Image (spheres, rainbow, N blue to C red):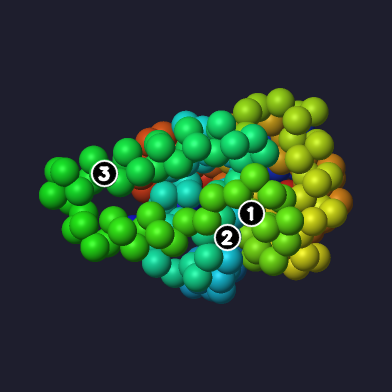
Amino acid sequence: TMQFITHTSKSASNKVARISPLNLNLNPNLNPNRFFQSRQKSSSFDSVAVVGLGLMGHGICQVAASSGIHSSVIAYEPEQQFLEKGRERIEGSVGKLVNRGKLEGEDADRILSSIKYTTDPSDLKNTDFVVEAVIENMDLKKDLYSTLGNTCKPSTIFASNTSSLSITEMANLSGRPDKFVGVHFFNPVQIMKLVEVIRTDRT
């Protein structure tokens, strides 16, 4: 079971803790039911996409495909060489689980076949939830969110896996700050069942 910690980003810093299922006494004025209701609705994200298939991104993509609750999992890289490296990482990781007897071959085939790999951003236009896991460069992310904002449907929620940049700033750059969160996974994603969720005042 994945565990979640939620934070609120009020400025350039993302370090202000507000509510956590591991310690609900962080702020007694907040209603924990809001958090748990959002978890129960997570399966409503029928189609998800992961942008960036590096160290963290490939793991996030693998976990999304392994969950079995999404009808579509899209893996996106703008360049074919990076897309292929991401594919190799995912296939290698899943293969290790099979070799260690932790995953059946049929399940591995289902996971791998459920992922659509693409370099075409238009393939993300109908996704419900997009996780960005590109390198920690705000200029790069600014360009990316501009592309995503012009491509994805208005209801698509954007989430950044950043561990150091401002969620509030990226939310403002996205053009849809009310539909923007931080989802900081821990490495290795396939093993560390913990996700830090950061929201802004406008999320």
Q: Are marks 3 and 1 in contact (CB under 8 Å)?
A: no
Tell me if I can see residue 69 in this picture.
yes
Q: Whole-percent x and y of residue 88?
A: 40, 37
In terms of secondary structure, where does tag 1 sit? strand
Tell me if I can see residue 26 in this picture.
no
Q: Which mark is residue 130?
A: 1
Q: Whole-percent x and y of residue 193?
A: 37, 48
Residue visible at 69% across and 49% down in the picture: 120
Whole-number angstrom distance, CA of label 3 to CA of label 1: 26 Å
> In the rendered picture of this protein, how many numbered marks are placed on residues?
3
The outermost residue toward the left is: 101
Q: Whole-percent x and y of residue 105?
A: 21, 57
In terms of secondary structure, where does tag 2 sit? strand
As displayed, is residue 192 above or below residue 177?
Answer: above
Residue visible at 71% across and 40% down in the picture: 167
Sequence order check, earlier mark of 2 and 3:
2
Residue visible at 48% across and 33% down in the picture: 85
Q: Which mark is residue 95?
A: 3
Which residue corresponds to mark 2? 48
In terms of secondary structure, where does tag 3 sit? helix
Quarter of the picture containing the C terminus is bottom right
Residue sitting nearer the eye, 196 or 33: 196
Amino acid type, residue under disc 2 in the picture: Val
